[in-house]
Every structure is written in C-alpha cells, then in structure tokens.
Image (tube, rainbow, N blue to C red):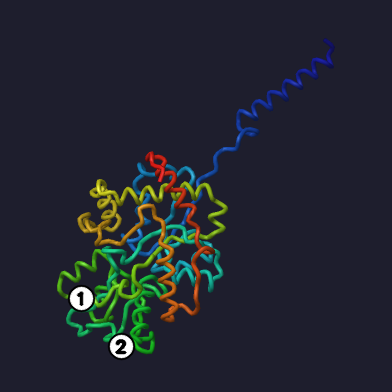
Amino acid sequence: MNMHRRRWIRRALAVAAMVSTSFALGGLATPAAADPIKIRIGWSTMPGHMIPVLYSNPSVLKHYGKSYVVEPILFRGSTPQITAMAAGEIDMAAFAGTALAFAVNNAGLDVKVVADIIQDGVGDYHSDTFLVRADSGINKPEDLKGKRIGTNAIGSASDTGMRVLLLNKGLVDKRDYTSIEVAFPNIPAMIEEGKIDMGMVVQPMSDKLVKSGKFKVLYTIKDSVGPSELVFLTARNDFLQKNKQAVMDFFEDHVRAMRWFMDPKNKTEASALIGKFMKQPPENFDYMFTTADYYRDPFLIPNIPNLQSMVDASVKAGALPAPFQVAPKHVDLSFVEEAKRRIQASEGKTQ
C-alpha cells in the first residue's frame, strides 16, 4: 500500500470517528428535550379559584416539570388581568363574562374560554353573598340608594352581579350609589366600621359573619343573574396554538389535581394544603367541595349557556355596552375534553 493511499485511509477513518462521536454526543441525533414551558396564570380569590394550590401535590401530577411549570400571579379581580394579558405578562386568566367581553372588544385580544373555575348558584350550591350590618336598616336592594358599596374590581364577576341587580332595581352607579374598590379580605372590616354599607364576602368568612348575628345577607348573585358560569379560565389563543402539546399535558394535570381535591377520601390532606396556603386552620375549609361551596364541573368543562346568560343579563342591565356572543368564536374546550379522555382512559372508562 503506497503512502498516498495510507494517508487517505487515515483521513477517512478520522472523519468516520468524528461523525460517530457527533452522533454519540447528540450533535446529529434526535434533539434533546426542550425545557418545560412556563404557564403564567392569573387568579384573584382563594380558596375559590384554587390555582395557587392545585400543583402542590406532586404525586397527582404526571407532567409538571417535564413539559410545563406554572407561575400563579395574584390580581385584585378579573379586569386587571386584561391589562396584564394584553402586555404579555400572563398566558391564562381567571375571567368573568364582562372581562371576556372587554378583553375582546376593548383590548382586541384573541382569547378563548378553556376551562371551568367556579359556577355560582347551581342547584343547592353556594351563591356569592352581599352582606350588610344587621343593624344597618338596609333590608332590600332599593335601600342602597345613597350608600357606599365595596367591590373588589370594576367588571369582576361579583361587581357584575351587583350592578345587574341594582340596575334592575333602578339604581345607577354614581347617580344613586358610590362603588369603592376594596380587596376581598378588607370588605368585612370596612362594613363593620361603617366605611362601606355593603360588600360581597367570600366563603368561609360569609357564613361565619352571618352566624355571628352582626351581619345579614341582602341578596346573592343567583338573585341577580340566576345560575352562572361565574369565573372561568381564559387563555391567549396564540399561546395555546404555539404550545399545544404542553398545554394538553398541563390540562390533564390541572383536571387531575382538581379531581383529587374534590375527592372526599382526600378531604383531610386537601384541607391541610389549603389551610397551609391560607395560613388558617384546616377545619376552616371543611365546607369546601360541599353544597356550601361553589359548584365545579367534575372535568372542569365550563357551562357556556350559563356564561352567555350572564353576559346577556349584563348587556340588558347596561353593564356591557353591546351584545357579545361567547361561542363558538371565543371558546376552545378541546384541552379539557382531551384531559377528560386521558383521565377516563387511565381509569378504564370510555365515557
């Protein structure tokens, strides 16, 4: 073998070795798995929305840390989340019907209703309560003329219910009453101190205050709009489409986690997790997932007709300036439906 041929063979072997090494190191092999996407989710009330604690039991989650992670972000209500979503600061939001309409019509956002969070006044389940002092002399909505009303955020679910009822009673904001934005935890003290005359108080505080005898229920959201899809999870459509597989995994875990919390056999552990986050004794949350609590669909599939009914009531009462059609353009239930299919398949069920 001549010198030139030996050199050629050595070069060929060297190239082959380089190619082999490249494959071994992954340079020409299947790309490494991408980092999990971060899903930033807005929420405003606990334990109603449950978002900050849903991912606290790793044994329930199949995909967390693999295809996705979650960053819950606290807001005062639904409407402040519109600005954050428009600025690209959150990917999903806890919206009420009016917030959805404002997000589409005012902010020009392409958003989809993707999952249930809480439903109000379904059957015998809880409906949000508006409280006044028992000695206030306020006995019916009409008595609120000239009064101050605490609302967590203009355009939120509770704010919408309040405005719809009062408009139906002939009372108009600024003309007949004054609405003051107050964070939910501060409403009871402000009512008791006479700084506001009425406000919506969330569970478990509302039942405790009524039982104390110092407060009474003036009306509920169910009195205002009937059973409603009170708060639902909404997502930016571009985010859904760009991260479809990861979002599918997220919703499988999201629904699994909610079902775990709702399962009576997990009551003690679930109450402990909620109590730890809320910095309250676990027994304060014994009412959770009973009829004293909001209704939640077992697979978090939102009730779109009840959502539309609340939007229509808001339009009729003047809380929204124009009709707004929710479905089909602003709804995408494919993610929770796929979650349901996966979960039922793992449980050996077909429907």
Residue at left offset 43%, top offset 55%: 71
Q: Quadrant of the N terminus?
A: top right
Residue at left offset 15%, top offset 73%: 213
Question: Residue 306, position in %: x, y?
Answer: 40, 66
Classify mark 2: helix, strand or loop: loop
Residue placed most toward the observer, 238 or 12: 238
What residue type is disc 2 on? Lys
Residue placed most toward the observer, 213 or 69: 213
Question: Residue 279, position in %: x, y?
Answer: 26, 57
Residue 198 location, quadrant? bottom left
What residue type is disc 1 on? Lys
Q: Using residue 295 as the reference point, say whether residue 336 is left or right of it.
A: right
Mark 2 and mark 1 lie on one chain; the one further toward the N terminus is 2
Residue beneath disc 1: 216
- In the image as oriented, which residue stretches furthest toward the top? 1
Residue beneath disc 2: 145
